[in-house]
Amino acid sequence: MLSIALAGKPNAGKSTFYTAATMAEVDIANYPFTTIDANRGVSYVRTECPCLERDQRCTSDHCQDGKRYVPVELLDVAGLVPGAHEGKGLGNQFLDELTNADVIVNVIDASGGTNEKGEPVDIGEHDPVSDIDFIEEEMDMWLAGIVERNWESVERKSRSPGFDLDDVLADMLTGFGASAIDVATILRELEYPEDPIQWTDDHREALARDVRARTKPIVVAANKIDVAPPEHVEALLDLEKPVIPTTAEGELALRRAADADLVAYDPGDTDLEITGDVTDGQREALEDLAQTMADWDGTGVQAALNYAVYDLLEHLTAYPVQDASKWTDASGNVLPDALLLPEGSTPVDLAYAVHTDIGDGYLHAVNAKTSREVSDSYELEEGDVVKIVSTN
């Protein structure tokens, strides 16, 4: 399962975002370091279900009238403060938790109502743009420190016959999520001495920055847009970085209202409908939230998760079935499974994603939408429904 980590300084709204996205109860408070131990839960990315192409909707619990929700892991950890890579705040604990994440959602306080340490200040007093750069810098310098501490081992190995820098760095950086292909690609784009002994701090830092950018891409969730000064939001959206306007509190309120049958709302919808008996105060709050959603095309929580997976990680959703005509599994369930795979994946990759044994026994695959057999090298597309024929 893909893992999305929520990063950010304290009190930016990470725990609220996490609760809204997972509906798991965690501590939420208006002071730094509310989160001490990492929270791990299951959230979902949203896509269109292929069942919309048929007369009947599918039977999956993760499909809401054609809105398909695909599970991902969501991680909420302690907030970062300046100097986190040197151990300030709960920095080392936070950064270590990021090791296994595939992508980062940097939750910032777009209202400028918290300073760089996460302490409350007047709305608009702090510049939220600085929070984006500082998170990236802390992550980069943390990884640079790891590279520095392990470089002596690289130098020793460089004296051995058959030394290969790509292989040695790949071994060192595997724990951070860098593959051999990642390392090879990065080294092709860097300028560095052939002898590791001649590498400087600048060389190692450049390596660390490129590895972090490639293995831990970041999308910014500009949170608290419902109270943010317009000029703050505009400045964030003008950046040459992916920024999603977000109100985590609004999403959480909607999820709870939907559970109480007060509104009709599914995560990722761009509007809401009041359907229950609400008080005057609740109606006013919901109407204000509806206006915020109209201004920003939703609450942004689902959009941030979707951008992280489908845009930054460049994944797609594929649906394995056993009956190509009915799109069902052996028990007759329609489109029971949805799997996230990197763009460029083939039916063979899908077979292995279903189960190693299915992949080992792979014979061929059928595109259930066209009822035609596809080649082993066929590149899957978003929403493909595929029957895998295997000896296992």
Image: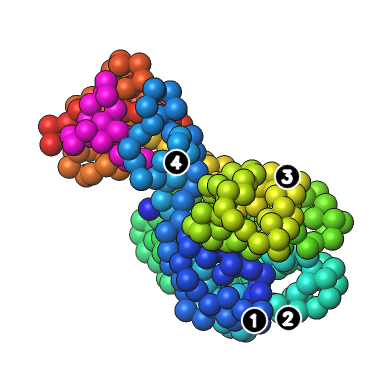
Task: Say if the magenta span includes residue 382.
Answer: no
> Judging from the image, what secondary structure is the residue with disc 4 in?
strand
**Is residue 375 shown to the viewer in this render?**
no
Q: Position of residue 14 (x, y in %)?
A: 59, 67
The CA span between labels 3 and 4 is 22 Å
Q: Which span of residues is magenta-colored?
A: 320-338
- Disc sitting over residue 294 in the figure: 3
Crowding around mark 3 (Cα neighbors within 10 Å: few <14, some 14 to 19, many 20+) is some
For residue 69, side relative to residue 59 (left or right): right
The CA span between labels 2 and 3 is 30 Å
> Judging from the image, what secondary structure is the residue with disc 1 in?
loop
User: Which of marks 2 and 4 precedes in the sequence?
Assistant: 4
Callout 1–callout 2 Cβ contact below 8 Å: yes
Q: Position of residue 294 (x, y in %)?
A: 73, 44
Residue type of the residue flagged with mark 2: Glu
The CA span between labels 4 and 2 is 40 Å
The CA span between labels 3 and 1 is 31 Å
Viewer-proximal residue among 117 and 60:
60
Viewer-proximal residue among 242 and 295:
295
User: Which of marks 2 and 1 precedes in the sequence?
Assistant: 1
Q: Which residue is mark 1?
A: 32
Please name the residue shown 52% across and 65% down the image: 19
Crowding around mark 4 (Cα neighbors within 10 Å: few <14, some 14 to 19, many 20+) is some
Q: Which residue is mark 4?
A: 64
